Image (cartoon, rainbow, N blue to C red):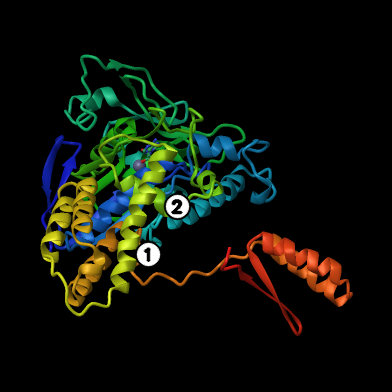
Amino acid sequence: MAYQIYLFNSLTRKIEKFTPLEGKTVRMYSCGPTVYNYAHIGNMRSFLFADLLQRVLRVVGGYKVRWVMNITNIDDKTIRDSAFGSIAWLPEMGKQTDDPMQNLIKFTEFYRKAFLEDIQKLGINLNDFYKMPKATDYIPQMQELVKRIVEKGFGYIANGSVYFDVSKWRNYDIYGKLYHIDFEKFKEGSRIDADSYDKEEFSDFALWKAKKTGEPYWKFTLNGICCDGRPGWHLECSVMEREILGLPFDIHTGGVDLKFPHHEDEIAQSKAGYGIEPTAFWCHNEFLLVESKKMSKSLGNFFTLRDLLEKGIDPIDIRYLMFTVHYSTQLNFTFDGLNSARKARLRVQNYIYELFENKNETGIEPDIEKLRDLVFAELANDLQTPKAIAYLFEFLNEHPANNLSKSAVNRLVNFFEELNKIFNVWKIEPKPSETIQIPEEVIHLAEKRYQARKDKDYKLADKLREEILSKGFIVIDKKDGFELRPNEND
Ligand code: AMP
Ligand code: ZN
């Protein structure tokens, strides 16, 4: 049975009933990564939030989801870091050339592939995406939108760049409605060229930027004026969501920092150029913090997924950690917090293993339908993962796995399979038999001993046997080698 989904809409600042615009398919667009570096786990919170949402829509809401996430491979940062002689260029990317376009593509493809590897480790399934378009594949369509905006009188050309005329736009009561801009406090700024800006002012932003020496560019003539250059960052989303999903679509996601200017500018562009706002449903995740500050590359207080994997952390624990806190609450990242998340995840995992070990014919028969209903109703209610998890733990604590009847075990295993289609952090299977890892060092000692025996140096062989034993292993001589076993009496 499907549940009615409710979501907090940033536009109205209310929890609203969600229904797709057309039939049973939800069309959802998520602002994706800027591929100029490895994504940090703050960014990952945003992608895991979008993943959670699309999974809840499918499993709990009973919908099909057409999920699109863009790849920003052209902006100020990708241009800066792929430029000839940049210290951000890695030997693994190959040789830099004197062609800035080739450098840009090589550089961003390297990080795009790394991103795909990373999100898969975090339990995001690439097959769940309808498309992951790259900005550079939509340049003609972006030029077309710039043209439309200028034709309709909302854009102007200055020194070969094209700007959006925000002051003109303000009269339409649209600009500022997502970020809830208080125009009393917000100053009218001057024109702004940077892709990212967070000044408390609204400025004419760049739709298209004139080419600069040494930068990649595309040919573009507008109103007879040479505007060779490249798109401003906000343009790509307005274009790709329309091209791939059609306007309006159902849900747009991103981190809270994107409300302004990125999403405000996106709304302005789409409404001015196409006459339609992208969507009526905007969902934003809160920040991941480190020591109470936003985790960001510019502050230098960030961990990439790779940093954490090097510390031996299981990426699935990071996925689970993100779900222990509601997406609209700031999450302060600490290693203690991550460790607690791991323990909680493993507590459920062990319960699942115990279910498979349960060979009872008869036993207690708890109400699993009720558990499912409590958990799914919380997920349907604006993705209340912490509350859903709380119900799960309450059930686990009250119903030890070895007390359940066979039929209860079967129903519970089915429930976990369904729940894991959302959480994707457990293995719904019997506990794998433990394979003992023999340390390299012990194998090396045993090889040395084998050689000593071949050399008939029995004194050395005995000494090595003792040494192996002191490390917790017994060596057994075989005709053509040896076998190592853990010392059970240890
Ligand atoms: P970027 O790669 O900078 O374009 O960002 C990708 C996504 O990560 C966007 O949706 C941002 O809003 C989001 N984001 C960036 N920093 C954080 C953070 N510390 N916590 C949560 N989300 C973030
Ligand atoms: Zn975007």
- Kindly tell me whether residue 475 is visible in this rendering: yes
> Regarding ligand 2, which quadrant of the image does it lie in?
top left
Mark closest to the chain's N terminus, 2 or 1 = 1
Residue that numbered label 2 is attached to: 315
Between residue 129 and residue 428, name the one nearer to us: 428
The answer for how far apart the CA atoms under marks 2 and 1 are is 19 Å
Q: Give SS at disc 1.
A: helix
Between residue 45 and residue 214, name the one nearer to us: 45
Q: Position of residue 137 (x, y in %)?
A: 45, 52
Neighbor class of circle 2 (other Cα within 10 Å; few <14, some 14-19, many 20+) is many
Q: Which quadrant of the structure image shows residue 484?
A: bottom right
Q: Which quadrant of the structure image shows residue 65?
A: bottom left
**Which amino acid is tagged 2?**
Pro
Quadrant of the frame with the N terminus? bottom left
Instruction: Give me the residue at 53% from left, 70% from top.
Output: 435
Note whether 118 is above or below 479 in the view shown: above
Q: Nearer the viewer, mark 2 or mark 1?
A: 2
Residue that numbered label 1 is attached to: 127
Between residue 38 and residue 371, name the one nearer to us: 371
Instruction: Give me the residue at 39% from left, 46% from top.
Output: 32
- Kindly tell me whether residue 239 is visible in this rendering: no
Q: Position of residue 127 (x, y in %)?
A: 37, 64
Instruction: Give me the residue at 38% from left, 57% from top.
Output: 124
Note whether 151 is above or below 312 in the view shown: above
Quadrant of the frame with the C terminus? bottom right
Q: Position of residue 467 (x, y in %)?
A: 73, 61
